[in-house]
Amino acid sequence: MKKIPKNFDVKKARGIQSALAKRVIKKDVLPSSLKTIAGVDVSYTQNLAVAAVAILDYDNLETIEVQFSLVKICFPYVPTLLSFREAPAILSVLKKLKSEPDVCLIDGHGVAHPYSFGLACHIGVIKKVPTIGVAKNKLFGEVSKFEHNTAKIKDNSEVIGLALLKSTCRRPLYISVGNMVSLDKALEIVKHCISNNYRTAIPIMIAHKLANRKKHNLVKRIKK
DNA sequence: GCGACAG
DNA sequence: ATCTTGTCGC
């Protein structure tokens, strides 16, 4: 069913991931006082990716700017290689932003990845901006015991991310460093953006809704 | 060989 | 992620 295009070299892709993984900065290289935060998400129809980004005011989480981008899909979903499917659409939509957000939340993992280079790292390293991976499902690593709301995600003894459990949810959110942010700061930021009604960070939820609405509008137009 | 496997 | 109607509950 899901076939990798023959013009795509999986080994080369893994080589890219391993090489770029060395460029991930796991320290705070962002303003100490955040003014804005962005959320990104992608929805799909046929062979089209609909990417949406929303920039919110960090304090009141109100939307400041939104952008969309439509990109043809040329790669299937393959666990550990999500970047090669989604990054083109995300990079495209980020280019359209008129202002640079202080930090960007990505729906996927950061360094909590078999090659320490998930989608959030991919975007962060290529764009050289602070990013945080916020995923709804685990991809890699072992989740240790919860202490209060959080549990460490470990690769052997190394902490590669955190699982965050909301009081209202059974399933946790998986947080990991994308780029230019420490894990502690990433947790603080995601906690700040947590919603009681949705099991993800608010900026990502906004982007998710925008991408879906855009996609449905497109489908309607095509039918006419 | 078997199970796991972001969106 | 996507294919999909009604239905349960606040």
Image: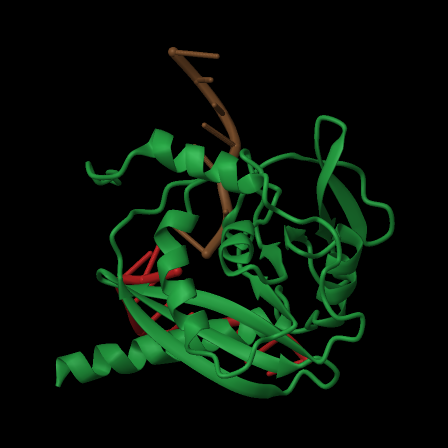
Chain colours: A green, B brown, C red
In the image, A193 versus A56, the foreground residue is A56
Tell me the quarter of the image containing the N terminus of chain A.
top left
**Residue at (43%, 40%) from the top-left corner?**
A79
Residue A139: tell me if it is visible. no
Q: Picture quarter containing residue C1?
A: bottom left
Q: Nearer the viewer, residue A110 or A217?
A: A110
Q: Is residue A121 left or right of residue A217?
A: right
Where residue A58 appears, as percent x and y from the top left, is: 71, 79
Q: Say left or right for A162 vs A90.
A: right
Residue at the far left in the pictured view: A224
Q: Estimate the x, y position of residue A179 in percent, counting from the top left.
A: 63, 54
Q: Is residue A93 visible?
A: yes
Along the horizontal axis of the image, is A19 left or right of A144?
left
Which residue is outermost to the right? A148
Point out the image quarter for the C terminus of chain A.
bottom left
- Asked if residue A217 is positioned above or below residue A164 in the image, the reply reads below
Q: Residue at x 87, y 52 (%)?
A: A148
The x and y percentages for residue C8 are: 55, 71
Q: Residue at x 22, y 40 (%)?
A: A5
Where A77 sits versus A29, above or below? above
Label tally: 0
Viewer-proximal residue, A119 or A47?
A119
Image coordinates for residue A21, horizontal then vertical, percent = 56, 40
